Amino acid sequence: MVRFQHVMQEVTANLAMGIGPVRNWRLRRGRTIRYSPTQHAEEFLKQFQFCIDYIGWDWIQGKTVLEIGPGDVIPHGLMFLGAGAQRYIGADRFLGDVSSDTARQLYAALVTQAPQRVQQGLRGLGRNLSDYPWVGEDGGADSLVLPLRLGMEALKREHIGGVDLIFSYGVVANFSDTGQAFRNMAALLNPGGKMVHRVDYGPIGGFRQYKNPLTMLTVPQPLWQLMGSNRGYNNRYRHSQTLQVLEQAGFQNETKVLYRHPPEFIEAIRPQLVSPFRELDDDDLRISMVDIVSQKV
């Protein structure tokens, strides 16, 4: 059962994020950097390697990379450019201050821990690493790095041109309009382009405190909107729903399931599920984390 106090806290936070000055203050304050630069660098290196494991070092040469939802920092830009990519774009509806002192400390830590081939690639760019992110004076299409405060649901080819790789880590479950986001990705991808997503279907925020991680699926949709419509809240799509929307957008997909909830969680929560989750089978509800690699048909 969802606690009343928790609901009220979430509704209050959501209403606050709908107020312009509060929203701007929250973005400046940062939301995703909570540990030391060294600890965060280790995590970002793992995320980068996860993507490289699927696409390969050779494939990335000369490509344009779009990362969806980088948050407060864009360290993957350094990694992809050092690996041989031609251009990096980071787009986030809630993009933070990617040039802050905290961000720059992370970038410096990351470079010292990066694979030698990435370090060599960065030196070959002839750029001052302390000046990263390297954004052109006009911040336009010629920028080596282009950070955009724009959600995937609104990002068009006219904003950034075509891209070869779309990459995200723990972001797909937070799209406000999953169908539109995937259709926009399809329009952005150049011929032969790929997408690599790690998708976390698990609970968000305060819902991680509940013993059963599927408790969030017991909240009616109108109340769910009140709790998170201004905050990039979890869209609660299950794996079958995500794949269906991907296929409708014109993608052929390969998936690797990384984690499933124990069966007893499904058995305990099923009587409380709201539609459309109560209609889904147990196997679908159990899937908690997956990797999805996609190409346009």
Image (cartoon, grey):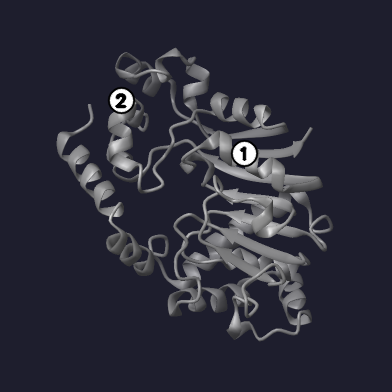
In this view, 20 is above or below 172: below
In this view, 172 is above or below 267: below
CB contact under 8 Å: marks 1 and 2: no
Name the residue rendered at 52%, 22% in the picture. Answer: 284
Question: Could you tell whether 113 is left or right of 86 in the image?
Answer: left
In this view, 157 is above or below 89: above
Q: Specify few, some or many for label 2: CA neighbours under 10 Å numbering under 14, 14-19, or 20 or more.
A: few
- Which residue ends up furthest to the front in the rendered image? 158
Q: Amino acid at mark 2?
A: Pro
Q: Position of residue 167 (x, y in %)?
A: 64, 51
Name the residue that disc number 2 marks. Answer: 220
Residue 228 image-quadrant placement: top left
Q: Position of residue 73 (x, y in %)?
A: 51, 66
Quick one: 15 or 127, which is closer to the camera?
Answer: 15
In this view, 9 is above or below 243: below
Name the residue that disc number 1 marks. Answer: 182
Name the residue rendered at 34%, 19% in the picture. Answer: 273
Q: Position of residue 70 (x, y in %)?
A: 53, 58
Q: Specify few, some or many for label 1: CA neighbours under 10 Å numbering under 14, 14-19, or 20 or more.
A: many
Name the residue rendered at 46%, 64% in the picture. Answer: 72
Q: Amino acid at mark 1?
A: Phe
Q: CA distance from mark 1 to mark 2?
A: 25 Å
